[in-house]
Structure formats: C-alpha cells, structure tokens
Amino acid sequence: MVASRWGLLVTTALVSAALIAPAAAQNTIALETIDVVPVTPVAGSGGIGARSATGERIDGGGALPLAKVPFTVETVTARKFEQDRATLDPTFTLARTTPGVNLSDGQGNSFRQTLTYRGFDASPLQGAPQGLAVYQNGTRINEAFGDVVNWDLIPQVAINRIDIVTGNPIFGLNALGGAVNIEMKNGFTWQGKEVSVMGGSDGRILGTVQYGEVIGPWSIYFAGEGLRDAGWRYQSPSEIGRVYADLGHRTLDSEFHVIASGAKTYFGAAAASPVDFTRDNDRAIFTYPQSIDTSVGQIQVTGKVNISPTWDLSGNAYMRRFSQFVVDGNDAEFENCSTRSSFRGSLCFEDDGFERAPGQSDQAFRNQFLILGPRNQQIPFRTGVPYGTYDTVRTEATGYGGTLQATNRDRVFDRPNTFIVGGSIDVANYSFKSGSTLGVINPDLSVTTDPNNPTYGTIPGLGVGPIRTAAALGIAPSQVTGSNLFMGLYALDTFDLTDRLSLTAGARLNFARISTQDQTGFSPDVTGTHYFTRINPVAGLTYRFTDSLTLYGGYSESNRAPTPLELACANPDRPCLLPNSLVADPPLKQVEARTYEVGIRGSVPNFYEGGLLTYKLGAFRTDLTNDILQVAVPGNAARGYFVNVPATRRQGIEVAGEYTTGRLSLYANYALIDATFEFRGDLSSPNNPLADDGLISVRPGNKLPLVPDHQFKAGFDYAITPEWRFGMNMQAFSSSYFRGDESNLNRKLPAYVTANLNTSFQLTKNVQVFGLVTNLFNNRYANFGTFLERDDNFAGRYVLNDPRTTTLVQPLSVYGGVRVTW
C-alpha cells in the first residue's frame, strides 16, 4: 500500500510539473538569488547585514557570500512559511523542505515535536540530547536549564528566513550538528498591513496580524498570533498566543533595533500511547493529565555601525525570562512493603532497580523505600488499588547577555579578505522544583487525588502533598537553584587566495560554568560547580569553477557542555523520575564533535525558459566522543539517569535541487543519514522485550533510534492563473528503531509517506482566500516509539501485552482562511 501511494504521488508530481513547465515559460521574471548567508550569530540579528538605506546589500555583520562558505547552508524563506501559515509551526515547514530534517513526536502534540537534523536534536523534551544551537536574531534560545528548544514560542508569521549552518563552531555550545539561525522580520524588510483568520479540523481557530512601515530613518514592525484547537487525540488541546515587535533606526552608516517578544502556550501533551490501545482507537492516550504551560518574554537590542570603509562593529544584548509548569499523571511503582522490612502493611516504592550499599543489611536496605506522606506519615497499603502519582514540575529561568563583533575587509597581499573577531557572554539564573502527590488511576486512566478517600492511601485530615521514600531514593521532592555562565571568544578569516579559491580558518574558545544548589536537604550531592573549556578550530576551502559551480570542503570541531539536568542526574544508584527529580551526580564529560564536509553547489540563471536552478550535492561525517545518553534503571523504567558513551557517528550524503520561475517553484531532495554507535558495551533498557536482565548489548554500527536512514522530499507550487496558486508536496522516510532499542534487535517503526496540499486565490487586490490539507492520504504512521512494561492488570482492568508504545501523527486535516492586506 505504501509503495502504491508513493508511486501515485510521484507520478502526480512529475505529470503536473511536465504540464505546467511550458505554461510557466509564458510569464517568467528575473529572480534575486539569496547568496549572502550568516557565518556568525550576529549575522542573523534583526536584519543586520541585510541592506543599506539606499537598498544596497551590506556584506557585513558576520555574513559572507555563499560561494565563499566552506560548509553546508540550508535556507528556508518567509514565502515557504507563508504556504503553511495554518499550522503556525516552523518545524512543519523545515521538515517538508529541508534535506536531513525529520520530526519525532515524543510528547503527543504536533507543536512540540523534536526536530532532528543529520541525527542531531533540537527538542522541547527535557532530557533529550541537544545537538543543535538555535539563535533568534543573534540570541541563543536553547533554554538555560536543559538546553531545550521550545519551537512553540517562536512567532511563525514574523520569521523572515531560517538558515541551518553546519560545520561552524563560531556558533558556540551545542553546535555539534550545526546551528539554526532564525532571522525575524522588521520594518525595513517587510512593509504593509495584514490580517489572517483561519479555521479547520479539530476545532482549530487561529488568527495572525502583522504590520510594518518605514517612516524616514525609522521602521516599525509588529506581529501577533493566536491559536486554539481541541487536538485530534483525547485530552490534547492546544492554545498559543505570541507577539513580536521591532523598532528600528537606520542611517547610511548604522542600523539599530529594539525588539520585544513574548509568548504563552498551553498543551495537553498526552505523550506516547500503548499499541494495545491505539489498535482499537487511534485517538487513545495513556494516563493523564499531561499538560505543559509555558511562557517567555524577551527584550533585545541589536546594532551595527560602519566605523570606517573597511571596519564595522555589530552586536546585540538581551534579557530573557522563561517559565514552565508541567502536570503529569503517571503510573506509580508502589507495592506492599517487603516482609524483610520493618513496615509490612505500609506502602513502599519498588526497589528492584537498586542495590544494597556495601555492609548494609537487607532490612535497612528495604526500609529505605517506605513511602512517607507530606507530614512524614506512613501510608497503609491497600490491595487492588491502582496507585498513581500526580507529578508537577516548575522551571523558571532569567537569562541575559550579549555579543560584540568587529568585521574588517582590508585587502591582504592585495587580495580580498574578511576578518571577523568577537566575543559573547550568556548568564542565566534558574530554579527547578518538582514533587509527586499520591493518587489513583481511575478507569478512564485519569490520575486524581482526594485526601478524604482512604483508597488513595492518605490518612483523612492530613491532606495531600509531596511524597517521598524514607531515604529519598527513587521518588522525592526536589528544589534546585543554580546559574550558568557561558563565555566565548572567536575569530574567523576568509582570504581569497585567487579570484576563485578562498580559504577560511578560525577558532572559538568556549567556557562554561554550571552551578547547582540543592534546596531540600535530600540530595546534598547535587550542590556543586562544574567547569568546561575547549578551543574549537575550523578550516575550509571553496573553489568557484564558474559562477554556477562551487566546490567546498571543510573540517571543524565543536563541543557541548552537560546541562544542569544531566549533571544532577548521572548516578544509576540515585535515579531520577525524569525530568521530575534531581539527585547526586558523578561528573559527566563534555561532548566533543569532529566534522568533515565536502560538496558542490551552485545556481544557474536562465536555466530553462528564464527560470533559476539551484542545486547542491554534499557528503558529511561527524564523529562524537563522550556523547550523552539518557537510559532507564533496570526494574524502574520510569526512572533514569544520564551516561557518557565512548563514541557515536553521523555520516551521509545530501542532494537537492530547486527550479523557480515567476509562476512555478519545483523542488526535490534526498538525504542518507547513517547515525550509528561506535562502541561496544551494555546499556540499561528494562522494558526492551529482548533485553537480558534489563540490559541490551550495543555494538559498533548499531543505529541510533528514531533516525531514518533515507529521506526523500519533493514539491511544487504553481500559479494556474494570475489569481490562483496551487501546490503539493510529499515526504518519504525509511524505517527507524524505537527509543530503548539501541541494540537494534526489535522490529522497527515502519517507513512512511505523507503528502500535503496548499492553495490560494486572490479574490481582489487586497483579499485572498487559502487552504491547506495535511496528511493528504491519511496515513496512520508513527514517528516516535519506545517501550513500556507489560502488565496483565494495568489500573485493575487493562491488559498490556505489547511492550511497544507509539505516537501516531495527526490524521488528514483540512484548514481554510482569508487574508486581508492593505
């Protein structure tokens, strides 16, 4: 069935392209080539390095002509995001257009998916290994506590372009697989007034507004977005509110912007569901509530000054406030206290995943797992009660910092040369607080608490509140405060050895100080300060055979410091209820990456009937040492910890082409991503059905989970008439392994194909109607999977025979709306 649908879609696309290409030739226009790209974070700072007041392109602020950049650059423009405006999700557009990008939904909501590029993650999921540095207008938006990336907080309508840049350590920490540079609109780059209103499947209602104007040397831009829907799964609503404002001032020699942005989102993120449930009902979820309430506010100043004809100074400064509150209803691994303890008849936490300390008696070991209530009371065990926990997590962070950079274009040995030197500092103070309240799993799988109901295990009159084990092992409230200090110094030089051959070389010094303090007294070993330092070099060559063909190649190194969460949860003897607790930590090592790239690229104007052809073909390899993985504890899969593993590798090839005329845009690309472990050893994966006593054996060449080997993407957008545009795109991904199957022994998540349609009709000069169809063939595939513990009497009534748990993607959805501009 998949093969037949693939064949139908490819045939449709090719036939459509063949029919419309001649027609497109009747109305061709000259198109501007996007050939200046950021090679530093400052280059994406609110239009810096974009255009002068007279409209002339400024090659500055850390931007270089693409023909001189010795690594891969992928660019997605505002027009492509506009086609997907009904999603309000930038990751949707990146995944459908960009080679090497795939999504995995570990949280059960399309707005909070993990974006993976070349096997490296930029994820909103706490505990996911973050391998991409993400910048918005030159400010790093990997959050302070776990380096997570909350894509749902980025206003899509205000995005001017996104560049993914690889092999460049100048972007600092986390740029293992590359950096995502998000340049937002401002009044100099977008003028007009626009209001859009949309609606569609699952009760979705959304609206956007944007306004941009230039008044003499000043510019103003404002954008707002709002969305609400019920979600296609049970208990999974979405609410989004985002605003963005930019005030700019420009002269012939300078440009400054003051930027304010804010967002508030709420999701019922139902997470993965047991396959036993989704076989009967696609909309099924597991235990709930599972909600995520997030807000962010940021103020930023960016600027650039031309000090002389060959020197310019640019930079930015920011302050960012982040807050998130998570509610999570879970199964509780509680039991009657052991007969070998002193508390038989009371409630205890399962101790299967723990070992006795040297010299510790069996009774003393068992006594550690007695559950104590909010007033340190023992809780009587009652047979047949499906115990659960109502877990809450609150994360707060305030960050501030900035970057200052100088660029020089003096000729060296009478040859063109661009020299960039700069420094950055990022400081953040954060707090993390979590706790678990004893509850019960109801027949509808909701987890609730009631202090007056004795079946909940609490004593009437004593109330509810955080519970813990007597020794604070496995389950305990946590409260941690801390701070991060990241500093960097960098230099990058691009020298034209000849008119066609350019050499780029540089380096960045990264310094990280991560400090945490336990506030509960239960985990004193959490308190500590960790330092990480590394110098990362970069070198590469580009050779322009013709104006339409460039050969590039480069080598670079980069690093990632462990996050505060990882550092505080690295001991298998004191595992975390991820991400709900923090415990003692043996230090983790920083991750180090070495990347090699080679390829060709170019653009051919007037390729066919006046159209523009852009193309690229490249190969890459990134070797990592001391990569950090999250693993589960044997016997306690809900609890886990972080470990360094000796080596992993991502390597592959990418090929892409795009043909554009005034009426037609047609693209296709393919990526091979070979993401593997390169060490021999055992990892904990207690719910893997083929594990040996909770352990799986990893061998060199085993694939990393959730990374498809093969990705193919194609699409077109065509003006059938001057008023009516129609587009179609498809993506095909090969199979991938479940998370928790690093040994590659179980069957995979199946390969899948998906397709989308978009159309718009210009009713009048100012009024446009548009539509979007996602998952056109209603394929019920999963892009995320892991394992759970088998249970023939879950919550007293459900049988879980299949250990697999997956997140199905959103089914066929249809949206429509109207846009008014003036």
Image (tube, rainbow, N blue to C red):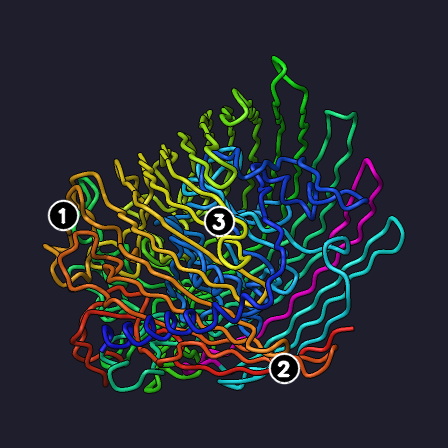
User: Element type at marker 2?
Assistant: strand
Q: Is residue 620 left or right of residue 210?
A: left
Name the residue located 67 percent from the left edge and 24 percent from the top edge: 409
| Residue lying at 66% horizontally and 39% vertically, measured from the top left | 401
Residue hosting label 2: 769
**Do callouts 3 and 2 mark residues in contact (Cβ within 8 Å)?**
no
Residue of label 1: 697
Query: What residue is shown with label 3?
Result: 74
**Residue 246 shown in magenta:** yes
Q: Answer yes or no: do the residues labelled 1 and 3 have beta carbons within 8 Å?
A: no
Q: Earlier in the sequence, mark 1 or mark 2?
A: 1
Disc 1: CA contacts within 10 A as few (<14), some (14-19) or many (>=20) = some
Question: Where residue 436 appears, x then y in whole percent?
Answer: 42, 65
Q: Secondary structure at mark 1?
A: strand
Q: Which residues are magenta?
A: 231-259
Given the image, on which type of amino acid does mark 3 rest? Answer: Glu
Decide which of 162, 263 is in the foreground and name it.
162
The residue closer to the viewer here, 679 or 206, is 206
Q: Is residue 273 above or below residue 633?
A: below
Q: Secondary structure at mark 3?
A: strand
Q: For residue 390, what is the image quadrant?
A: bottom left
Answer few, some or many: residues within 10 Å of disc 3's Cα (few below 14, many 20 plus, some between 14 and 19).
some
